[in-house]
């Protein structure tokens, strides 16, 4: 069977086309369906359904909504509820066997791409102030008429969406579908491309079924799920698309292509696109490197293609997280923005594309998907390739509004971390490879004293691991360093009331390891040579079942014996020349799917186990890996002034509780910069905080600060990990203001940092965003970790008093005078109801 993200065998036999609108009471075995010899999208007179009144369904439930049907010309669907496009004959109860109106014409054998019909049936999926409105044409795939602000009334939308036909282009106006191609007059990146042993594929699609369901567990009328299936018989392809409007307005989409032909089909690309309007004039696509992840970069969204392709075999330190298009000058709190994220930990593509002729009914497109290497996926007849989820977020409140949709969706997942995020101590920068039981016990004693809740033993515990050149792959405890195993340390840690964590890097092997010497063929590598090493290690080929089985056995044995609460799962290099040995083909796709499967199997065996995604810092941060992990390590740098920016921009995608950040020592191990302890503590506070420092040699004063800091975190943790992240559009580049505001606006925390010296003599009035204008707040600055160093003769009067009372409107529209902090200093403001 060939390489796919999901493989399935499907019959090429198709039943009559069906459109189903499943109601909120579909659990009572009620649904509306219409069948015809051709796709229902071709029916000019259609049933329109809405729910009204009360009725009793056949399973005995009382007072369920009563379905009503009537004939009309246009479907308008919201979360599975259709509203009328035009008045027509009304029927109450079940739909008649044969709808009224003119007879249904037969499906032509060779459809052509559809023009934009003014009366095209439309499907509206809406939630939390945003809407996705799709046209379902007579021929061809569904297309998006609108993605942006909610449109409760879509009357006239389709009629006003058809563009002019300029000279020297195709002879008709074509809508750009969810999977655009050249048959739609589109000369940009195709949504689907591939070949049959060199024969090109340009499918002409027949839609067989469109199903609209309510969003599970969401209030009626909130969100919805649209699934369509289509076939291109001449091309020998089937297509399934799924779009979900989540309850907080995040749009998620994925596609699956099936080979219904008689020979092998090789996909080259399968990407999802949504339209952009002409108002999208700028684009933001963060980049970065090791210890400097998530660096913002902006440019005009000019004509042409802005393509961010990652061929690193992992997400990458330079991954954009979100590729964002927006109105001119958009920021965290201003402007209209459209963002895309590909939820995949292998090679991927994000792109924004604007051509001179536009994009059908739109001006440009935004999208992405997996980057497939030549021949990486080959589908035998009946096999399917499924894309990763591609996530889209729109906001008219700037980047904060865009991020909030993702954060709220993440928090609503059933597997989102439900327990309070514990304060961590990680041993890496404290001891590196120098593992000694007495030293680590003393470190644990001090950790417990200052309020640490989880003690993580990092790299260096397994056989032969005295530095980073040996031992990877041999996942047994080193008997020379740990003659009694890890039990003496872990028992001691648990006796102190802390959880236990353990570092692993399962996907890698050192040449100097028993595993490599025994199985050199297990390396992800061309047959005739080895790829260059990175950090002294090679990548294991997890696409080989025997390799995945070995790793599962070793990890399972470790977890079963030592019962860690947490695994820090590292991945310290890019994949280069990633060739799957048994086939000689490109191996990144297979490798990524195998890593996901390994994580899934391990966690199925140990349901309480938490996993952290670390990849030489922030090299694997995406929503694909976060479906099976509980936090990410944002960066290997613990320098707080670097971390302030990294954590701010990681927040484009992730809420604070999923982002690890630690208090390091006074001198940063990666930058050499000396920073104040209070600054280090307050930087790590808004996140999932920890300590990475040999605190057994700290002074009593330093230990007192750490103890007060962990107590402050435990006090604020419920707010920090449930509220909305807010980031100010700072007018002074020398400062940074970030915060978290409770969902109900009742309280908030803001962190104000002076990054460098400023041309201003003092900050002036600093506005605090995101507050409720009608609520009066008690504003106080938290002195738990000490006074900041300042550059002034006197602080503002309210700061001396320690608190003040003002309305949210005053604090957000007028602001508050803050002290003139010295460079590298941070203060914390806490707002509660007055």
Image (cartoon, grey):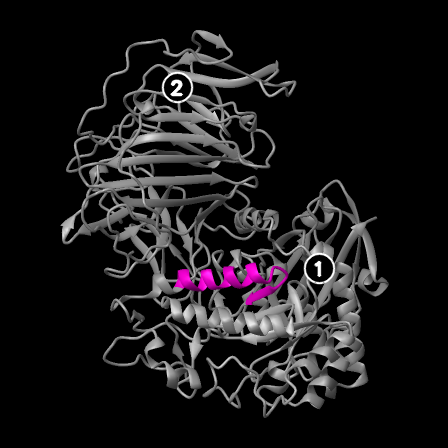
Residue 540 visible to the viewer: yes
Task: Tell me: 574 left or right of 736.
Answer: left
Relative to 404, does residue 571 appear above or below in the rendering?
Answer: below
Circles 1, 2 touching at the beta carbon (< 8 Å): no
Q: Residue furthest top?
A: 89
As measured in the structure, the alpha-carbon distance from the residue carrying label 1 to the one carrying label 2 is 50 Å
Task: Tell me: 700 left or right of 327.
Answer: right
Q: Nearer the viewer, mark 1 or mark 2?
A: 1
**What is the total number of numbered labels drawn onto the structure image?**
2
Q: Position of residue 611 (x, y in %)?
A: 57, 65
Q: Position of residue 201 (x, y in %)?
A: 19, 45
Q: Judge by depth and name the residue closer to the eye, 425 or 669.
A: 425
Where is mark 1, residue-wise?
420
Relative to 270, does residue 236 appear above or below in the rendering?
Answer: above
- Mark 1 or mark 2, earlier in chain: 2
Q: Position of residue 826 (x, y in %)?
A: 69, 69
Q: Position of residue 222 (x, y in %)?
A: 56, 33
Which quadrant of the structure image shows residue 240?
top left
Q: Which mark is residue 18?
A: none
Task: Write down the region rendered in magenta.
Answer: 592-612
Which quadrant of the structure image shows residue 300?
bottom left
Q: Residue at x 29, y 56 (%)?
A: 1
Where is mark 2, residue-wise?
74
| Crowding at mark 2 (Cα within 10 Å: few <14, some 14-19, many 20+) | many
Q: Judge by depth and name the residue closer to the eye, 381 or 88.
A: 381
Prevalent SS, magenta region: helix
Question: In terms of secondary structure, where does tag 2 sit?
Answer: loop
Question: In terms of secondary structure, where does tag 1 sit?
Answer: loop
Q: Residue at x 80, y 71 (%)?
A: 708
Residue 601 drawn in magenta: yes
């Amino acid at each position: 069977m060939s390489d796919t993200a999901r493989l399935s065998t499907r019959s090429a036999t198709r039943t009559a086309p069906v459109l189903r609108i499943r109601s909120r009471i579909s659990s009572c075995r009620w649904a509306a369906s219409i069948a015809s010899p051709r796709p229902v999208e071709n029916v000019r007179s259609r049933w329109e359904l809405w729910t009204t009144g009360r009725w009793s369904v056949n399973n005995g439930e009382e007072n369920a909504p009563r379905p009503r049907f009537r004939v009309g010309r246009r479907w308008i669907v919201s979360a599975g509820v259709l509203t009328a496009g035009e008045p027509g004959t009304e029927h109450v109860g079940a739909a008649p066997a044969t709808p009224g109106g003119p007879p249904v014409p037969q499906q032509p054998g060779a459809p052509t791409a559809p023009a934009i019909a003014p009366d095209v049936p439309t499907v509206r999926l809406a939630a939390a102030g945003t809407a996705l409105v799709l046209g379902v044409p007579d021929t061809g795939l569904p297309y998006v008429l609108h993605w942006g602000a909610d449109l409760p009334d879509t009357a006239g939308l389709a009629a006003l969406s058809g563009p002019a036909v300029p000279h020297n282009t195709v002879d008709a106006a074509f809508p750009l579908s969810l999977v655009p191609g050249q048959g739609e007059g589109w000369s940009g990146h195709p949504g689907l491309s591939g070949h049959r042993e060199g024969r090109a594929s340009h499918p002409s699609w027949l839609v067989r079924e469109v199903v609209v369901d309510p969003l599970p567990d969401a209030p009626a009328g909130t969100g919805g799920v649209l699934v369509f299936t289509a076939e291109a018989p001449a091309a020998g392809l089937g297509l399934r698309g799924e779009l979900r409007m989540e309850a907080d307005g995040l749009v998620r989409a994925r596609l699956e292509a099936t080979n219904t032909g008689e020979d092998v089909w090789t996909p080259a690309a399968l990407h999802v696109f949504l339209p952009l309007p002409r108002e999208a004039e700028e684009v933001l696509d963060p980049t970065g490197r090791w210890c400097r992840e998530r660096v913002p970069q902006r440019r005009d969204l000019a004509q042409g293609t802005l393509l961010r392709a990652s061929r690193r075999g992992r997400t990458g330190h330079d991954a954009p997280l979100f590729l964002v298009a927006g109105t001119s000058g958009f920021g965290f709190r201003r402007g209209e923005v459209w963002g895309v994220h590909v939820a995949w930990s292998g090679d991927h593509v994000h792109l924004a594309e604007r051509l001179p002729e536009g994009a059908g009914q739109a001006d440009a497109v935004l999208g992405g998907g997996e980057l497939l290497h030549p021949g990486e996926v080959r589908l035998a007849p009946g096999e399917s390739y499924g894309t990763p989820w591609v996530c889209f977020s729109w906001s008219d409140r700037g980047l904060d509004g865009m991020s909030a949709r993702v954060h709220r969706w993440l928090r609503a997942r059933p597997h989102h971390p439900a327990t309070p995020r514990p304060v961590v101590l990680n041993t890496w920068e404290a001891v590196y490879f120098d593992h000694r039981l007495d030293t680590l016990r003393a470190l644990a004693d001090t950790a417990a004293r200052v309020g640490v809740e989880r003690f993580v033993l990092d790299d260096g515990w397994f056989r032969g691991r005295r530095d980073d050149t040996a031992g990877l792959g041999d996942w047994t405890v080193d008997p020379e360093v740990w003659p009694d195993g890890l039990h003496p340390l872990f028992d001691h840690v648990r006796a102190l009331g802390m959880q236990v964590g353990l570092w692993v890097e399962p996907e890698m092997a050192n040449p100097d390891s028993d595993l490599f010497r025994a199985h050199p063929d297990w390396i992800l590598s061309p047959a005739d040579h080895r790829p260059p090493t990175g950090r002294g290690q090679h990548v294991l080929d997890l696409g080989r079942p025997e390799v995945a089985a070995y790793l599962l056995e070793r990890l399972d044995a470790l977890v079963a014996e030592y019962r860690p609460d947490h695994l820090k799962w590292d991945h310290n290099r890019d994949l280069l020349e990633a060739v799957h040995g048994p086939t000689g083909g490109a191996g990144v796709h297979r490798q990524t799917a195998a890593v996901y499967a390994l994580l899934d199997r391990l966690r199925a065996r140990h349901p309480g186990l938490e996993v952290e995604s670390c990849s030489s810092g922030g090299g694997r941060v995406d929503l694909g890996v976060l479906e099976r992990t509980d936090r990410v390590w944002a960066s290997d740098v613990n320098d707080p002034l670097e971390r302030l920016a990294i954590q701010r921009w990681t927040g484009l995608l992730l809420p604070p509780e999923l982002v690890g950040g630690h208090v390091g020592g006074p001198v940063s191990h990666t930058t050499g910069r000396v920073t104040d302890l209070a600054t280090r503590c307050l930087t790590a506070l808004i996140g999932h905080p920890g300590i990475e420092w040999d605190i057994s040699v700290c002074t009593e004063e330093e230990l007192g600060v750490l103890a007060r800091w962990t107590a402050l975190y435990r006090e604020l943790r419920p707010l920090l990990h449930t509220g909305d992240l807010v980031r100010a559009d700072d007018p002074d580049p020398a400062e940074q203001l970030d915060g978290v505001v409770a969902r109900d606006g009742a309280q908030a925390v803001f962190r104000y940092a002076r990054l460098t010296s400023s041309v201003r003599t003092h900050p002036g009035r600093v506005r605090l965003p995101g507050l409720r204008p009608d609520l009066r707040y008690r504003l106080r600055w938290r002195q738990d970790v000490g006074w900041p160093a300042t550059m002034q003769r006197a602080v503002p009067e309210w700061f001396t008093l320690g608190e003040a009372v003002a309305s949210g409107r005053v604090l957000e529209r007028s602001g508050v005078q803050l002290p003139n902090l010295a460079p590298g200093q941070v203060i914390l403001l806490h707002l509660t109801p007055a």
